[in-house]
């Protein structure tokens, strides 16, 4: 059995959910995992997941220091690793420029996984010289699928968005587009799932002001954080059209999850969205310019992201009116796309890549004695 040391967060963040699914599916591919969690807040969906995680943490008590290491974590914090075997990282980033520190950390690895061809190109353009392997993320089709039960359509056509309050996620632009597309007499609703634990009172008030200034405020519903992925699937099930107008993304799990549940998608066509969104499975908001990425919190103009201007507003409004006026509630091409992106395939790609040419670092191999 292949042995692998993994260090990653396990929880409800994007990194935590992605790491959990990767870990689960690596274990399904005949691999013995020693897990070294990043952080302590491990929230899981089921007892089976708890058993898997607990066993992997137990394995870390007697880990193989020569086994390869996979770190699923930020590109600026890759200096530390587990053991002395080959070292692979799986980072996610959103903008088109990497800082010199990030390039140094990425180049400290023997190999790097990128969820998209866009991410690989950004790394190469910024001076990352180590092998980069494109490894798209997946969908848990045991949770996110189009269920056979009958849903009674509500009077309102329900647009929805999943993503924490953040300028990068563009809820400001979405609320304005919703206002521009519809009037009080239209039977529409906008549901947001925007919980962000990293915001202070002043930042939360900023988003509350944007929300309360909407002329259709009474048609917008805000949902609190959901406890499990099953609850998220239920939230998606009761919506009609998912809208994701991100200025930049490292992947965006929720789009393919919505596709898996047969939901129409309105999405910006930029960054990692270009890996799986196309004219067949999404209503694409095309991007014609980029601008400095600056939100005053996480990004300070060190790189660029999509510029959402009048052209993008017009496209979004047109799409929102189209799906509403034509009662578009299904996305068969989206279902086909989601079925191509399985977590099992992600796990297989990682295992096959890591063990393709042996798992030990060259510095750990035994030297042949001279005769």
Image (spheres, rainbow, N blue to C red):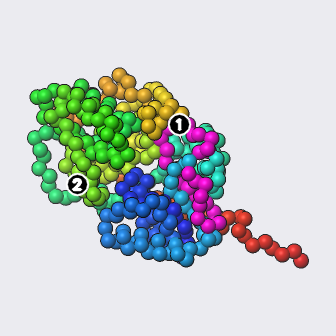
For residue 96, which numbered disc appears in the image? 1
Q: Which residue is mark 2?
A: 234
- Residue 260: image location, x then y, percent: 31, 52
- Residue 218: image location, x then y, percent: 15, 34
Q: What residue is drawn where x is 39% and y is 42%?
A: 277
- Residue 213: image location, x then y, percent: 23, 28
| Picture mark count | 2
Crowd rating for badge 1 (residues with CA inside 10 Å; few <14, some 14–19, many 20+): many
Q: Secondary structure at mark 2?
A: helix
Q: Which of the pair 56/77 is nearer the observer?
A: 77
Secondary structure mostly seen in magenta is loop
Q: Which residues are magenta?
A: 77-103
Residue placed furthest toward the front:
201
Earlier residue among tags 2 and 1: 1
Q: Secondary structure at mark 1?
A: loop
Q: What residue is drawn where x is 55% and y is 45%?
A: 120
Using residue 367 as the reference point, say whether residue 10 is left or right of it: left
Using the image, determine if residue 241 lies above or below residue 20: above
Q: Is residue 208 among what the camera can see?
A: yes
Q: Quadrant of residue 86?
A: bottom right
Using residue 341 as the reference point, say whether residue 75 is left or right of it: right
For residue 71, which numbered disc appears in the image? none
Labels 2 & 1 near each other (Cβ < 8 A): no
Crowd rating for badge 2 (residues with CA inside 10 Å; few <14, some 14–19, many 20+): few
On the rendered image, what quadrant is the C terminus found in? bottom right
On the rendered image, what quadrant is the N terminus found in? bottom right
Q: Is residue 162 among what the camera can see?
A: no
Using the image, determine if residue 339 lies above or below residue 275: below
Q: What residue is drawn where x is 55% and y is 77%?
A: 62
Q: What residue is drawn where x is 46% and y is 32%?
A: 294
Q: Quadrant of residue 280?
A: top left
């Amino acid at each position: 059995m292949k042995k692998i040391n993994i260090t990653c967060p396990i929880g409800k963040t994007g990194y935590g959910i992605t790491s959990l699914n990767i870990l689960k599916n690596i274990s399904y591919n005949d691999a013995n995992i020693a897990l070294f969690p990043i952080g302590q807040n491990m929230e899981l969906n089921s007892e089976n997941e708890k058993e898997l995680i607990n066993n992997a943490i137990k394995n870390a008590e007697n880990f193989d220091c020569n086994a390869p290491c996979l770190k699923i974590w930020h590109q600026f914090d890759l200096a530390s690793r587990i053991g002395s075997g080959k070292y692979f990282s799986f980072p996610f980033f959103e903008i088109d420029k990497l800082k010199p520190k990030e390039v140094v950390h990425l180049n400290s690895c023997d190999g790097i996984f990128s969820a998209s061809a866009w991410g690989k190109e950004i790394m190469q353009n910024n001076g990352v010289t180590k092998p980069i392997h494109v490894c798209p993320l997946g969908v848990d089709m045991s949770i996110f699928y189009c269920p056979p039960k009958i849903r009674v359509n509500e009077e309102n056509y329900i647009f929805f968005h999943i993503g924490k309050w953040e300028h990068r996620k563009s809820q400001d632009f979405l609320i304005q587009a919703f206002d521009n597309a519809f009037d009080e007499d239209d039977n529409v609703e906008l549901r947001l799932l925007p919980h962000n634990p990293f915001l202070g009172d002043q930042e939360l008030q900023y988003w509350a002001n944007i929300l309360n200034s909407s002329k259709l405020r009474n048609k917008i519903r805000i949902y609190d954080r959901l406890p499990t992925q099953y609850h998220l699937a239920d939230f998606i099930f009761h919506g009609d059209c998912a809208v994701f107008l991100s200025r930049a993304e490292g992947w965006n799990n929720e789009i393919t999850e919505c596709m898996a549940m047969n939901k129409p998608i309105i999405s910006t066509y930029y960054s990692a969205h270009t890996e799986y969104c196309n004219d067949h499975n999404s209503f694409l908001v095309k991007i014609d310019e980029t601008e400095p990425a600056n939100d005053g919190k996480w990004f300070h103009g060190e790189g660029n992201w999509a510029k959402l201007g009048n052209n993008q507003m017009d496209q979004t409004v047109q799409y929102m009116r189209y799906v509403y006026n034509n009662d578009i509630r299904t996305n068969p091409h989206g279902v086909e796309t989601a079925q191509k992106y399985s977590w099992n395939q992600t796990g297989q790609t990682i295992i096959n890549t890591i063990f393709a040419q042996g798992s030990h670092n060259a510095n750990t191999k035994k030297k042949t004695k001279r005769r």
